[in-house]
């Protein structure tokens, strides 16, 4: 998180505040324990699967819910399931984005195993796919997303070097530094999927309507109380809350902590229309949308298999962008499948695919839409839970 005159909620809204006098009395740095994952596996971790998992848990995922459960009881196998409690019913009612986050986890796992000379055979949905409706997920929670069998012999992947430097850039990009077509093509070349397609643009005439769509769709999410509230409820303020959860939208700035302590940051309801907080939220999305120096997208069909594959591709693109010094930031609002977003969902498909929004899982679907650009300031890591918390034993 980066402290400003107002508070940016990572992946969510904004809270306005005066900063004067507060910054001296407490540190705004994120508690070190919450960021321990970014140091890579501890020296004491010698089991190869656990070492690889220590990298996989840094995967990008919606609202940093970290919805992964891993079973290591079968030798040389990693069985990945989803945690049905870690979902976003309002903004991701079919769990599509959650599945994209599983794909990112799997890809980092495969890359980190290969780094140890281990080949991963990834079998998706070995017992069938998750149901379409989130409400049915709890009953289906035993269905593995993937069974990953491990054997000797793998080629290392150069993207491994960038795993612990990968962060989602949520600040305004440097508008003085355009992204070149060749840099864009370099990022897209890392996609590595035969199933999904990736594309992008740095052409001004295509950027303009996509920037506007990002802002318009952010408005829809913000003005729909239940979707706005879904983000607000995931905000963790201050070291105690951050350390107790190590997920969600973490804020440790002195001003938000003070506001929270004085009961001025109400997380039980969305900020009122035209309030300062709402204006700051709009300012934030205005900034991030308008400073999009390019866009990258991932498209394909929309089965559970495709959603996971989209995540595998997404993290490869983001790692390659990291390697090139370019920030990549998903702007997922227009891809959210709640009724109020219908017009923007249609529009994103028109702008990216020149086609209507999908009507079935076999129709072409925009799975990810991300802005890209150069980052003017260092980006801070987001928390991750401790490795053991992802490992199921029963
Ligand atoms: C499917 C998916 C959708 C996402 N959508 C957004 C988004 O709309 N806005 C945003 O700021 N970040 C978005 N993110 C990024 C996450 O917020 C981010 O990965 C998470 O907070 C962890 O931070 P990190 O990527 O820096 O480790 C998305 C990530 C994924 C995988």
Image: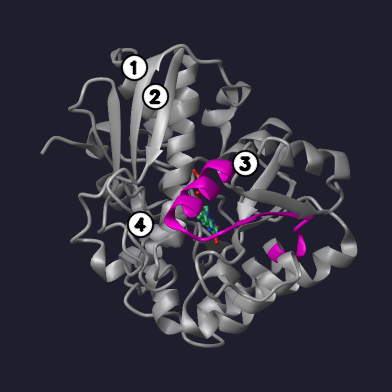
Q: Disc 2 and disc 3: Cα gap in Å?
A: 24 Å
Residue positioned 73% across, 33% down in the render: 324
Whether tag 4 and tag 2 are in contact, CB under 8 A, the answer is no
Indicate left or right for 295 with 196 as reference. Answer: right
Indicate left or right for 289 with 162 as reference. Answer: right
Say whether disc 3 or disc 4 marks the residue closer to the N-terminus.
3
Does the stretch in magenta take in 135?
Answer: no
Q: Disc 1 and disc 2: Cα gap in Å?
A: 6 Å
Which quadrant is home to the C terminus?
Answer: top left
Residue pointed to by mark 4: 236
The residue closer to the viewer here, 373 or 98, is 98
Say whether disc 2 or disc 3 marks the residue closer to the N-terminus.
2
Counting labels gives 4
The vertical placement of 89 against 42, above or below, is below
Does the stretch in magenta take in 301?
Answer: yes
Residue pointed to by mark 1: 48
Q: Disc 3 and disc 4: Cα gap in Å?
A: 39 Å
Tell me the magenta residue range. 289-314
In this rendering, does residue 7 appear at all? yes
Residue positioned 17% across, 27% down in the render: 73
The mark closer to the camera, 1 or 4, is 1
Label 2 packing within 10 angstroms: few (<14), some (14-19), many (20+)? many
Indicate left or right for 180 with 323 as reference. Answer: right
Residue pointed to by mark 3: 194
């Amino acid at each position: 998180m980066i402290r400003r005159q107002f508070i940016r909620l990572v992946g969510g809204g904004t809270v306005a505040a005066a900063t004067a006098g507060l910054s001296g009395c407490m540190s705004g740095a994120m508690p070190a324990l919450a960021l321990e994952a970014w140091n890579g596996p501890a020296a004491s971790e010698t089991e190869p699967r656990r070492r690889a998992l220590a990298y996989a848990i840094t995967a990008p995922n919606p609202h940093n819910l970290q919805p992964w459960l891993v079973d290591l009881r079968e030798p040389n196998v990693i069985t990945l399931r989803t945690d049905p409690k870690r979902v976003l019913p309002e903004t991701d009612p079919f769990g599509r984005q959650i599945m994209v986050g599983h794909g990112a986890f799997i890809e980092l796992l495969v890359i980190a195993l290969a780094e140890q000379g281990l080949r991963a055979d990834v079998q998706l949905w070995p017992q069938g796919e998750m149901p379409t409706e989130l409400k049915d997920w709890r009953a289906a929670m035993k269905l593995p997303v993937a069974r990953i069998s491990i054997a000797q012999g793998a080629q290392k992947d150069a993207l491994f070097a960038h795993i612990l430097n990968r962060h989602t850039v949520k600040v305004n990009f440097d508008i003085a530094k355009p992204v070149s077509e060749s840099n864009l093509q370099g990022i897209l070349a890392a996609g590595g999927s035969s199933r999904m397609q990736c594309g992008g643009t740095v052409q001004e005439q295509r950027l303009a309507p996509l920037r506007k769509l990002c802002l318009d769709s952010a408005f829809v999410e913000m003005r729909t109380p239940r979707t706005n509230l879904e983000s607000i409820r995931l905000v963790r303020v201050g070291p105690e809350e951050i350390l107790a959860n190590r997920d969600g939208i973490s804020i440790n700035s002195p001003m938000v902590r003070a506001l929270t302590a004085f009961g001025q940051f109400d997380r039980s309801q969305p900020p009122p229309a035209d309030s300062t907080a709402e204006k700051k939220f709009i300012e934030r999305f205005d900034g991030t949308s308008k400073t999009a120096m390019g866009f990258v997208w991932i498209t394909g069909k929309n089965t559970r298999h495709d959603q996971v594959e989209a995540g595998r591709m997404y993290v490869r693109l983001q790692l390659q962008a990291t390697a090139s010094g370019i920030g990549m930031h998903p702007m997922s609002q227009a891809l959210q499948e709640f009724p109020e977003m219908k017009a923007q969902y249609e529009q994103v498909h028109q702008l990216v695919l020149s086609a209507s929004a999908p009507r079935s899982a076999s129709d072409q679907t925009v799975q990810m839409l991300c802005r890209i650009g150069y980052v003017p300031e260092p980006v801070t890591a987001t928390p991750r839970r401790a490795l053991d918390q992802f490992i199921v034993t029963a």
